Image: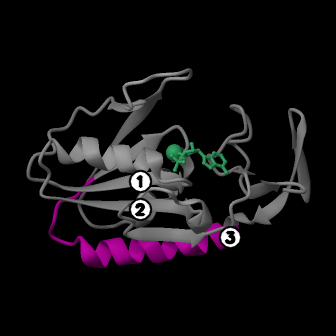
């Protein structure tokens, strides 16, 4: 499919599954090499990372644990500053090597909060992998260790990423037309 319509918007083909998965192969190889013997715990951030997480974890061959969390998001105004919190983490991460698995880092806000919150639980070390990074959109300083692909600041859907809840099941990545 060269383009798709989701709700009121048209998206055009941007990254095909085979291109994406070649980039994932490389990340998995690096993780296997770097984290061998560290018994890592992969913490995948739902919903967006579900396809990246499954493709990545099929390729990682060292012994590891895989877990899933969500970030709550509160719409509307707040004056507290803390807008999102991790929930669903059942493992004790104290003293562990942790790898956060994200779909995309845009401004870096979400990842900066995740790192801040997980650091409070005293892991031995934290690494971050993201399928996609929009370097020009970054506004927060975040540690990014394993970035599969850098992309321009266009809005994209597919491969786990959504537009208003839809499009996550597209096997390729599409970008908003005329953006
Ligand atoms: P950040 O906090 O600005 O870095 O944004 C991170 C979150 O925004 C991601 O986990 C996604 O859920 C969402 N997001 C950012 N860019 C896109 C996009 O292009 N398409 C779909 N979701 C996006
Ligand atoms: Mg995400």
Residue 24 on the magenta span: yes
Residue 25, compared with residue 105, is above or below; it is below
Q: Which residues are magenta?
A: 18-41
Q: Where's residue 17, x and y in %?
A: 69, 64
First in sequence, mark 2 or 1: give its number.
1
Q: Closer to us: mark 3 or mark 1? A: 1
Report how many numbered discs are placed on residues in the image.
3
Q: CA distance from mark 3 to mark 1?
A: 20 Å
The residue that appears at 36% across and 31% down in the rendered structure is: 85
Residue 101's tag is 1
Q: CA distance from mark 3 to mark 2?
A: 19 Å
Cβ(mark 3) to ligand 1 < 8 Å? Answer: no
The residue that appears at 20% across and 48% down in the rendered structure is: 119
Q: Nearer the viewer, residue 77 or 151?
A: 77
The residue that appears at 50% across and 57% down in the rendered structure is: 139
Q: Predominant secondary structure in magenta?
A: helix
- Which quadrant is the N terminus positioned in? bottom right
Q: Nearer the viewer, residue 39 or 124?
A: 124
Left/right placement of residue 70 relative to residue 37 reads right
Q: Where's residue 122, x and y in %?
A: 11, 48
Which residue position is annotated with label 2? Answer: 129
Residues under numbered marks 3 and 1 in contact, where contact means CB atoms less than 8 Å apart: no
Residues under numbered marks 2 and 1 in contact, where contact means CB atoms less than 8 Å apart: yes
Q: Nearer the viewer, residue 116 or 24?
A: 116
For label 2, the SS is strand
For label 1, the SS is strand
- Which quadrant is the C terminus positioned in? bottom right
Residue 134 on the magenta span: no
**Residue farthest to the front?**
79
Which residue position is annotated with label 3? Answer: 18
């Amino acid at each position: 499919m060269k383009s798709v319509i989701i709700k009121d918007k048209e998206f055009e083909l941007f990254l095909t599954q085979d291109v994406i998965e070649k980039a994932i192969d490389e990340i998995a190889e690096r993780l296997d090499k770097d984290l061998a013997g560290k018994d890592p715990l992969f913490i995948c951030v739902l919903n967006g990372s579900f396809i990246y997480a499954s493709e990545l974890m099929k390729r990682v061959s060292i012994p590891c644990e895989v877990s899933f969390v969500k970030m709550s998001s509160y719409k509307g105004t707040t004056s507290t500053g803390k807008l999102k919190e991790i929930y669903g983490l059942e493992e004790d991460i104290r003293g562990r090597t942790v790898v956060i698995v994200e779909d995309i880092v845009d401004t870096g806000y979400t990842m900066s909060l995740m790192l801040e919150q997980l650091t409070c639980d005293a892991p031995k070390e934290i690494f971050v992998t993201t399928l996609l990074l929009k370097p020009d959109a970054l506004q927060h300083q975040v540690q990014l260790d394993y970035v599969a692909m850098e992309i321009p600041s266009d809005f994209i859907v597919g491969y786990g990423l959504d537009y208003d809840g839809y499009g996550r099941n597209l096997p390729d990545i599409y970008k908003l037309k005329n953006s």
